[in-house]
Each structure stands twice: as C-alpha cells, then as structure tokens.
Image (tube, rainbow, N blue to C red):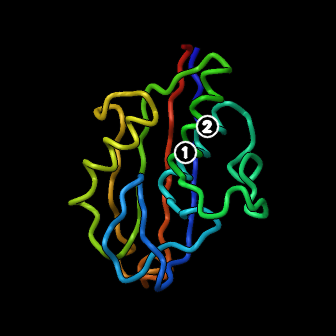
Amino acid sequence: MFRIGIGHDTHRLAEGRPLILGGVEIESERGAEGHSDADALAHAITDAILGALCEGDIGVHFPDRDPRWKDADSLQLLARVVWLASQSGYRVINVDANVSLERPRLRPHIQEMRERLAHVLSVEANCVSVKAKTGEGLDAVGEGRAVVAQAVVLLGRA
C-alpha cells in the first residue's frame, strides 16, 4: 500500500537570520524568520509525510508556542516524523520538492541538500528531488521578501 502527501511552507526573509534549506546553511544577506531554524524545505517535507500519514501538520507536532522547539534543527524534526512513519509501518520511497527564492541562487547547493535530506529520510539521494525556482520578480518571493517550499512524498509499507 502507498500513501502520498503534500507539504507547503513559507517564511519571511529578514536580515540577521541564517538561511537554511534542506539542512544546508547558505550564505545570504537575509535568512528565514521562524521559531525553529526556519528551514522551509525541511518543513514542507515534514508536512508532506504527516499529510500522507493523516497525522496533522508540523504545527500540531511542533507548535511554535512551545519553547522546546525554539531554534530547533528542522532536520531533527524531520527525523522524528520519519520515525513516526516507521512506527506506523511506512517508509519514504521518494520526495519531489520545489524551493522558490529570488536570491541567492540555489543551484550550487542542491546536491548537498539532496544528500542531507536523503540521509534523514533513509533513502538514496537519487530518491530526493529538489528544484530551485525564482519568483520572476513577482509576489513576496520575487520581491525577495520570502522563501517558499513545496513537497510531495510517496510512502510505502515498510
């Protein structure tokens, strides 16, 4: 049996914050604001897995009002959700994700993101697709005010 989930996350960009995507810190003048490390890509994948499991969303499991999750490493949150999937008898088969960010360019960091995410997801890197997009100068992404990530995950019986 298979299950499919979709995840989405948006974070405002601000000076003085690190930009972390897929567990990779990327040199940038502006980073994502959030209660945790604000890794929008890891959050979207986390939500996709939770959606496939019909277990709510990231806010249910890691509420932003809970001080335990302040500045949390989003890959550790993702690892907890992968564990939850395994406890439900599922494993990740593959992930397909988009990250929309006007700048900096993400292409030089994509392979490292795939490798870090694959490690946490317990899959090969060729089972994790990360695509970089821009906002083409439109909306909050295009104006350089936000980062947006979307992910789809396929789970199968372990």
Residue at left 65%, top 67%?
35
Residue 130's mark?
Answer: none
State the CA–CA distance, disc 2 to disc 1: 6 Å
> What is the quadrant of residue 114 in the picture?
top left
Residue 76's mark?
Answer: 1
> What is the quadrant of residue 52 in the picture?
top right
Residue 100, compared with residue 138, is above or below; it is above
Discs 2, 1 touching: Cβ within 8 Å: yes
Which image quarter is the N terminus in?
top right
Residue at left 34%, top 77%?
28
Residue at left 36%, top 43%?
116
Which image quarter is the C terminus in?
top right
> What is the quadrant of residue 119 in the picture?
top left
Residue at left 43%, top 28%?
122
Residue type beneath disc 1: Gln
Q: As rendered, which of 49 and 3 lies closer to the eye?
A: 49
Image coords of residue 141 (percent x, y): 45, 76
Image coords of residue 44 (percent x, y): 54, 51
Residue type beneath disc 2: Arg
| Circle 1 SS class | helix
Q: Which residue is mark 2?
A: 80
Q: As rendered, which of 59 and 100 lies closer to the eye?
A: 59
| Circle 2 SS class | helix
